Image (cartoon, helix red, strand yellow):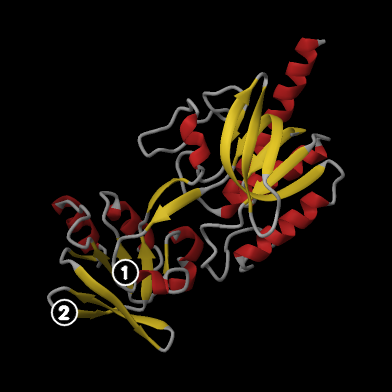
Amino acid sequence: MNDVDVAVIGAGPAGLSAALNLVRARRSTLLIDSNRPRNAATLASHGFLTRDGVPPLELRRLGREEFEQYSEASFHAASVDAIVPDGEAFALTGRGVRGAPALAVRARVVVVASGLSETLPAIPGLRAWYGTQLHSCVECDGYEKADAGLVLIGETDDLADRALTVSQWSRDLIVFTNGVGTVTDDEEAMLLALGVTVERRPIAEIEGESGSMTAVRLEDGTVIPRAGGFVRPLWRPSLTALDALDVQRDAEGLIVVDTGGRTSLGGLYAAGDATPPGPQQLIVAAGEGALVAAAVNVDLLRSDAGRG
């Protein structure tokens, strides 16, 4: 089992930023990624300075290229199955992906930046348009949907707040609760004052033709023309290996951290979407990765000084 200073799990913006800053601090850093990003279906990423509109996979490729130019950097294509405390370090094991060997490494510190897995409402046709006409990040994709006839589809109790954000770009908006999501009478009145309506009837299917979404068909047969919009998934941290560790989570299952990304378990850090408040813009996740890298480096320095 190889030894490194830091193992970073996840090669999205948070993990890449953390790994890059750690190798620049001359820390031996192993970046581990299973190549299953949540935004793989998205054609373009937005709001990332100097990379506005770049495909998500291209952004990841560029980040890995920058990271791997340093002698302290290494990369392993793997899915982490277990993280086990091992003395003053952690032992990580997992399955190699894309032809890579099995993972077996011992790291003084682990940074979890593996993001979130998501569950979309179980509506026929929805996934066919997800990433092209339907998106989950309003701030990321709202500009491209400006003034279009939009939907907001969800089954949660925060739809009114999300609709308020969407209305910044288009007030030709219908909130679909699919008979499950909650919008109170007061919230509906607030939205209606903006021209936003609420549709509570269950959805039968999201329809489209010629490569574009065209309408929402309800179970009672009503067809409502719509050109695209947003969906509210359910999210949870995508690294099941954490389930075996005594790590504090919030009510949403997100990993609770301090301002330096430290979790409740010493030596374990987290950054990006898996920490509160959850899904965020790529550039924010990258910033969090840099903050965590700084905290990790200082903590390792203090640990080494204490041993001396």
Q: Which mark is residue 116?
A: none
Residue ID at (57%, 63%) = 46
* Mark 2, residue position: 222
Q: In front here: 88 or 227?
A: 88
Q: Quadrant of the C terminus?
A: top right
Dot 2 amino acid type:
Thr
Q: Nearer the viewer, mark 2 or mark 1?
A: 2
Say which residue label 1 marks. Answer: 151
Q: Quadrant of residue 8?
A: top right
Residue 260 showing in the rendered view:
no
Tags 2 and 1 in contact by the CB under 8 Å rule? no
Q: Amino acid at mark 1?
A: Val
Q: Residue at x 48, y 25 (%)?
A: 246
Q: Is residue 307 above or below residue 124?
A: above
What SS does tag 2 mark? loop
Q: Dividing the image into 4 quarters, which one contains the N terminus?
A: top right
